[in-house]
Image (tube, rainbow, N blue to C red):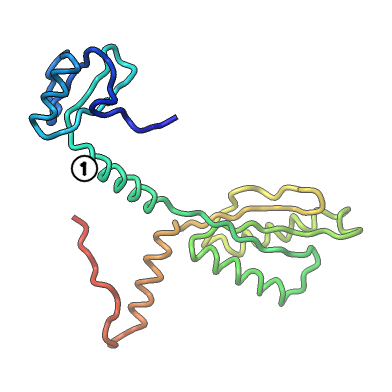
Amino acid sequence: MSTEPRINERIRVPEVRLVGPNGEQVGIVSIHDALKLAQESDLDLVEVAATARPPVCKLMDYGKFKYESAMKAREARKNQAHTIIKEIKLRPKIDPHDYETKKGHVVRFLKAGDKVKVTIMFRGREQSRPELGFRLLQRLAEDVTELGFVESQPKQDGRNMIMVIGPHKKKAEAKAERAAAKAQRGGEEPSVEEPSVEEG
């Protein structure tokens, strides 16, 4: 089913409730008169409420309306933060050096504003000692507490135990901070950053 509204000759009803180009109520008019008005003012007749009795139609520049709607939708999509979930896998009996390396990854992901799914993989007899995994996950959560918080508590999932850590910082904030740090590191070098646009 098309979500496009019916316009001009595609509106097949005897009469419509007409709204002018600036939102003013014209009233109930015959479809013939409404189309004539649209033609005279060089606008389109667009059905904005098809289920009303009679349907509500508005005089507008449909091409411009469609373009503006598309731009708004694009802007809304652009402002949506894309949440990426990174995954780190650990073993219950991890050696200290490996633990530090993995923790480093978690720190990096959280700083970038990404969520981290931490999976502890149990093998063989380790499955009978879930508390080892639980303690390891708690330790990791405490180690990164400044950057993230436990979004979903450790839970057993078959042979694995899973916990999700969410960043305190939003993706957009992390990006802005990275850009600022980059600019600072540049020091006196000629700036190749794009000129900043003042938000109005």
Mark 1: few/some/many CA within 10 Å (<14, 14-19, 20+): few
Q: How many marks?
A: 1
Image spot of residue 76 (x, y percent): 35, 47
**Residue at the outermost bottom position:** 189
Decide if residue 49 is on the left or right side of residue 152: left
Instruction: Relative to 51, say whether 60 is above or below.
Output: below
Image spot of residue 16 (x, y percent): 22, 16
**Residue at the outermost left position:** 40
Instruction: Relative to 79, say whether 11 is above or below.
Output: above
Q: Residue at x 20, y 26 (%)?
A: 58
Instruction: Relative to 77, say whether 63 is above or below.
Output: above
Nearer-the-camera pick, 66 or 31 = 31
In the rendered image, the quadrant that contains the N terminus is: top left
Decide if residue 53 is on the left or right side of residue 84: left
Decide if residue 49 is on the left or right side of residue 113: left
Decide if residue 1 is on the left or right side of residue 127: left
Q: Residue at x 13, y 30 (%)?
A: 21
**Residue 52 figure quarter:** top left
Q: Residue at x 14, y 15 (%)?
A: 27
Q: Which residue is mark 1?
A: 64
**Residue 192 figure quarter:** bottom left
Which SS class for mark 1? helix
In the rendered image, the quadrant that contains the C terminus is: bottom left
Three-letter amino acid code of the residue under disc 1? Lys
Q: Residue at x 74, y 55 (%)?
A: 134
**Residue 87 figure quarter:** bottom right
Image spot of residue 178 (x, y percent): 41, 70
Instruction: Relative to 64, say whether 18 is above or below.
Output: above
